[in-house]
Amino acid sequence: MPTMYSILAKKRAGLPLSGEEIGFFVAGVSDGTIPDYQTSALLMAICILGLSPEETTRLTLAMADSGERTDLSGIPGVKVDKHSTGGVGDKTTLITAPVVAACGVPVAKMSGRGLGFTGGTIDKLEAIPGLSTNLTLEGFKAQVQKIGLALAAQTGNLAPADKALYALRDLTATVDSIPLIASSVMSKKLAAGADKILLDVKVGAGAFMPTIEQAEELARCMVDIGRLAGRPVVALITDMEAPLGRAVGNSLEVEEAIDVLKGRGPADITELSLTLAAHMVAMATGDRPDHCRVRCEKALSDGSALIKLAEMVGAQGGDPRYITEDGYLAKAPIIRPFMATDSGYITRLDARLVGEASMLLGAGRTRKDQAIDPTAGLVLLNKPGDAVQAGQPVCLLHTSHNHNLSAALKVLSRAVSIGDTPPTPRPLIHTEISA
């Protein structure tokens, strides 16, 4: 029978942990029988010494089994889940999910809330008055069977070991360990019950992985977990140096997602959403992504994806007119411009700093129980490569109060760089990684 002392000594020596040892650890974390100081010691050892692919998979599966697993087998068809590692202005789920559902592939997706500078899909959805994301599991599955689409908040008992471990990782400087990040993400994805998983791994200033090498290492780690767990996983490395689209903030991002579904959204968020949707349909059908891309473009152009989102909003208690008609979503009472200080080209727009400015305006939270202002955020009038004149508005700040406006403007002054020549464009999608 393993003990935490023997497990710590073994990992300190750089030896691999067995499935029994990892199961003992996760069970003790879940029921609180292992003291925090021993859990923290093992987390630090993992952060320094790492885990093998087999160890990481064992940890992931044990965490997935620490709570309820969602059984989606009663829903006809292949269910494909999508997960983003977090970014700024990333409203792709609000676009890809209805596009994929309009192509006949059922989407049963549980999403999370935002924390810090990154946004969360559930916060965006709850900017629609009346819409409920707290569905019962039976109601969640029944809605997918009826209309092919449901987006709901994660249940409280989905991989509870991950919640306990993350709380300690946040306090012990062990957040940025690739095996721990990968097991955290994949334990929730495996427990959520999808047949196949598409990962959108962000890279750049607004991502947890700032370099291509780190993003690829994380993506390969998660793809390996899927392979070893018998769950097909594909990962796309996508750019998060600058925010996606032009809107940052919950209600503003919902409005922009609707614009994309109406065929008038920004090019970058439209392109990425269609690429992700095409890969999801391809994984479900076995067809080639380029063939599926044609189907996804048709779902966008003929309005069927927009109708699918409106159906989902209605089924979850919201008014479908918030989706189908313009001008229904609430606006912030205070809108303030941020002006360019020089003439030239925008050479950099730091996504993390833009997210931090949006958070100061009320669009984000520093604690999970903190309330947010759904109307707060900002709209980017210019992106990297655009020419600007001194005194010209670069973006518009939206807020319900004045007390953090000056702080947000100071953060934006660091986020925006202006130079004499336009920057070299960064690719939107860097690479694809699969088993």
Image (cartoon, helix red, strand yellow):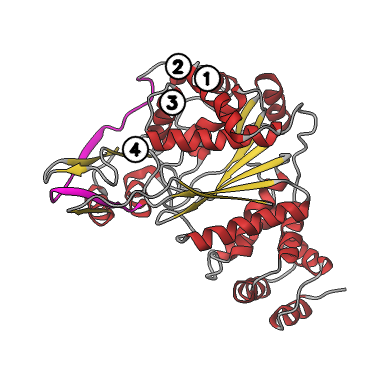
Q: Which mark is residue 324?
A: 2
Dot 1 or dot 3, earlier in sequence: 3
Q: Residue at x 11, y 46 (%)?
A: 390
Q: CA distance from mark 2 to mark 3?
A: 8 Å
**Going by the image, does 88 lie left or right of 69?**
left
Q: Which residue is mark 1?
A: 310
In the image, residue 196 sits, relative to residue 225, either above or below, namely: above
Q: Secondary structure at mark 4?
A: loop
Label 1 neighbour load within 10 Å: few <14, some 14-19, many 20+: many
Q: Which residue is mark 4?
A: 246
Q: Which mark is residue 258?
A: 3
Residue 132 visible at all: no
Dot 4 or dot 3, earlier in sequence: 4
Answer whether labels 1 and 3 touch (C-beta < 8 Å).
no
Dot 1 or dot 4, earlier in sequence: 4
Please name the amino acid that badge 4 sits on: Arg
Please name the amino acid that badge 1 sits on: Ala
* Image position, residue 216 (x, y; %): 56, 58
Q: CA distance from mark 1 to mark 4?
A: 23 Å
Label 4 neighbour load within 10 Å: few <14, some 14-19, many 20+: many
Q: Nearer the viewer, residue 356 or 37?
A: 356
Mark 4 or 2, which is nearer the eye? 4
Mark 1 or 3, which is nearer the eye? 3
